[in-house]
Amino acid sequence: MVRRLIPEPGAIVGMHRVTYPFPVTDAHGCTGSASASVAAAPALLVLTATPAQPPCYGQTGSVSLSAVGGTGPYTYSTSNLAGVGGGTYNYSVTDREGVRSDHQCNHYVPTAVSGTTTSTPSGCGVATGSATVIPAGGTPAIHIYGLQAER
């Protein structure tokens, strides 16, 4: 006869291996014992994808993947970690037990730096002209440098 004994609730605490003793008795009253070891579940598998955004228009960025928890070693879903263009990318990691964790990461590529100019001509014989540049694109904060012409 097979008997399944269930330990009382709350017997597994923390991340330590727990061994449960089981008394065994046959039909003639002969006794023995057996034990079973139960390991608590590993920590939740979590994937973090950290983007390194490109500093300028026309360049590409990269991403760093890091997994914690689960049971190592880990297998990552991609080897494309450098040369990443703008867009949304999905990454995943799978641990030795087949548990999977996903992370979505947005990569931004700055727009091209440009500017719109306006100018006012100087008056007759007097250097009173001006020029204005309104910057656009790029990565904030945009710095504006002025130039002053001398006669």
Image (spheres, grey):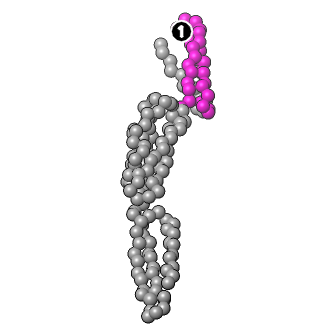
For image coordinates 47% across by 13% down, the residue present is: 1
Residue 106 visible in the shown view:
no
Residue 94 percent across, percent down from the top left: 43, 35
Q: Amino acid at mark 1?
A: Asp
Pointer 1 local density, CA inside 10 Å: few below 14, some 14–19, many at least 20: few
> Of residues 31 and 49, which is closer to you in this image?
49
> Of residues 73 and 126, which is closer to you in this image?
126
Q: Is 89 situated above or below 32? A: below
Residue 59 percent across, percent down from the top left: 41, 54
Quadrant of the image occupied by residue 57: bottom left
Q: Is residue 22 magenta?
A: yes
Q: Is 2 situated above or below 86? A: above
Q: Is residue 35 magenta?
A: yes
Label tally: 1
For image coordinates 60% across by 24% down, the residue present is: 18
For image coordinates 39% across by 39% down, the residue present is: 78
Would you name the residue on which mark 1 appears?
A: 26
Residue 3 percent across, percent down from the top left: 50, 18
Write down the region rendered in magenta.
12-41
Residue 16 visible in the shown view:
yes
Describe residue 139's horizontal placement relative to residue 38 as left or right.
left
Describe residue 70's horizontal placement relative to residue 91 as left or right.
right
Residue sticking out furthest to the front: 151
Residue sticking out furthest to the bottom: 124
For image coordinates 46% across by 92% down, the residue present is: 125
Residue 109 percent across, percent down from the top left: 41, 57
Q: Is 132 situated above or below 34? A: below
